[in-house]
Every structure is written in structure tokens, then in C-alpha cells.
Image (cartoon, rainbow, N blue to C red):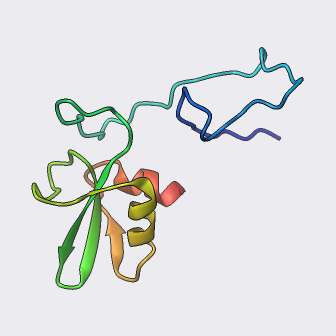
Amino acid sequence: MEYTVWVPAGGDEYVRPVEGQDYSTVPVERPPSHPYLAPPPPGADLRWAWTIECTRGAAVLHEHGCARAPADGPELTLDDALTAYARPGARACGECAAAEVLDRL
């Protein structure tokens, strides 16, 4: 069985090695680039950031930097975005990578 997961590199808050195990044969890949990823804003640290657009009781989640995202929308963490996405009536933008990413999580 094969299982693939993307984790942030550097730091031990997500993955820590098991003492005594050899990881030299574990393949390491960069996540594939998506043709619809919005460019990061100047000075961004390139971690996932999200924003939300609320209209008439519906919420649309956008990748931070999406052209359709409201300019004054709040910046959400991944946990905030997933919580908002789980609410009834919420959806992810189809113009940026929000739908592709949030649907997988």
C-alpha cells in the first residue's frame, strides 16, 4: 500500500522521526504546482493562507491572493478555513486552488 501526504518541511510540529529508524530511503518530493495557484502577495512567507467572502448568507473560501477574493477579507489559517468550509452553504472558489485543496482535506 502506498500513501502520500504533504507536510511542511523544516520544523517538527507535524512530523518527527521515530528514534532508531532509518529514513534515508523515504522519497521526498515537492508538491506539484497547480496552474491556477494565485501568486503570493509581496512579502508572503509562502504558507497556505485563506480568505473568506460572505454574501447573502453564503461563504466562499479563497486562496489568499485569488483575484476573486475580497481585498479587505480576513486572513484565515488552515484550521479557520476548514471550519468555515464545513458550515452549511459554504463553498470553495473554483478560480483558485481553494476547491482542489479544501476538498482533499
Q: Is residue 34 above or below residue 68?
A: above
Image location (x, y in percent) of residue 64: 25, 48
Residue 15 lies, with reference to residue 26, above or below; the image says below
Q: Quadrant of residue 3?
A: top right
Query: Which is nearer the eye, 87 or 75?
Result: 75
Residue 22 at x, y percent in the picture = 84, 19
Q: Residue furthest right?
A: 20
The quarter of the picture where residue 77 lies is bottom left
Residue visible at 38% across and 38% down? 47
Nearest the viewer among 37 and 23 is: 23
Question: Where the N terminus falls, by quadrant?
Answer: top right
Tell whether 36 sits left or right of 4: left
**Residue appearing at x 19%, y 36% in the figure:** 41
Q: Quadrant of residue 26?
A: top right
Vertical side of 65 occupied by 88: above or below? below
Residue 50: x and y, percent?
Answer: 31, 53
What residue lies at 16% left-to-right and 31% top-to-bottom?
42
The tally of labels here is 0
Rendered location of residue 86, percent (x, y): 45, 74
Residue at 21% from the left image edge and 60% from the top image edge: 74
Q: Residue furthest left?
A: 71
Q: Relative to 33, is 15 on the left or the right?
A: right
Taking the image as shown, residue 22 lies to the left or right of residue 104, namely right
Q: Indicate left or right for 92 with 18 as reference.
A: left
